[in-house]
Image (spheres, grey):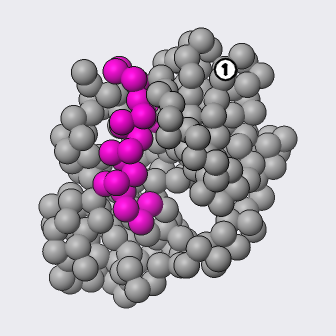
């Protein structure tokens, strides 16, 4: 198996399910353990993503707040991988933003591919990418110059032994990033790092 970001040959598993890439430092799930589309959609349908739930709004608030801080409401955005309850979009629409939705299971219309965006956000989505290099390149190409790619995921930073870490235990998390992975992505795709924290990453598209 090759790393799905940088194509490095993966040889040794660090536990029963994951490889650690020696080049980009990502943790990649063995592709023999990936869900098929039916099983994956069923898993997401169990999520309690009620847009009116205060707890869910608070969970996604770092993304919402980052957009409000960096992007005025005359800018056009894309909620990529919005799931069945696009809570961030709901919050932003109330503040006058124009947001398109895309999710392969719940909002599968691909008309977004014909547009350009000032900002794209993905909340708890990047860790589900089977082909992160393809996805990131696609999203970059959908951004205007100086457009922002805003990502909420949880970077592995030796918080606990990897095999015991909660984020690794979600069966649909197939690609887990580290700080080094995000730095590699910035270099690979010619993106500027605006914010790089354990749970929020913002890239800017260069000219």
Residue at 27% in and 33% down: 191
User: Is residue 138 on the magenta stretch?
Assistant: yes
x, y percentage for residue 96?
Answer: 71, 16
The part of the image, by quadrant, that contains residue 112 is top right
Q: Is residue 201 visible?
A: no
x, y percentage for residue 40?
Answer: 61, 72
Q: Which residue is mark 1?
A: 97
Quarter of the image for the N terminus: give it.
bottom left
Q: Nearer the viewer, residue 166 or 71?
A: 71
x, y percentage for residue 68?
Answer: 58, 20
The part of the image, by quadrant, that contains residue 59 is top right
In the image, is 185 to the left or to the right of 9? right
Q: Residues within 10 Å of mark 1 (few under 14, many from 20)?
A: some
In the image, is 198 to the left or to the right of 19? right
Q: Which residues are magenta?
A: 129-150
In the image, is 129 to the left or to the right of 97? left
Residue at 26% in and 25% down: 206
Image: 57 above or below 168 = above
x, y percentage for residue 7?
Answer: 20, 65
User: Is residue 103 on the magenta stretch?
Assistant: no
Quarter of the image for the C terminus: give it.
top left
Image: 58 above or below 40 = above
Name the element at disc 1: loop
Q: Is residue 32 visible?
A: yes
Residue at 75% in and 48% down: 85
């Amino acid at each position: 198996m090759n790393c799905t970001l940088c194509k490095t040959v993966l040889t040794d598993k660090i536990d029963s399910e994951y490889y650690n890439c020696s080049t980009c430092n990502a943790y990649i799930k063995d592709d023999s353990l990936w869900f098929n589309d039916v099983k994956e959609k069923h898993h997401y349908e169990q999520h309690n993503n009620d847009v009116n739930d205060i707890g869910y709004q608070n969970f996604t608030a770092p993304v919402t707040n980052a957009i409000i801080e960096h992007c005025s409401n005359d800018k056009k955005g894309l909620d990529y991988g919005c799931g069945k309850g696009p809570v961030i979009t709901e919050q932003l629409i109330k503040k006058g933003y124009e947001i398109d939705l895309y999710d392969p299971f719940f909002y599968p219309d691909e008309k977004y591919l014909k547009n350009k965006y000032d900002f794209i956000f993905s909340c708890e989505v990047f860790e589900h990418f089977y082909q992160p290099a393809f996805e990131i390149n696609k999203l970059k190409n959908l951004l205007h110059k100086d457009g922002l790619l805003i990502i909420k995921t949880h970077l592995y930073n030796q918080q606990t032994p990897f095999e015991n870490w909660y984020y690794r235990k979600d069966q649909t998390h197939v690609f887990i990033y580290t700080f080094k992975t995000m730095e590699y992505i910035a270099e690979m795709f010619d993106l500027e790092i605006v914010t790089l924290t354990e749970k929020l990453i913002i890239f800017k598209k260069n000219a």
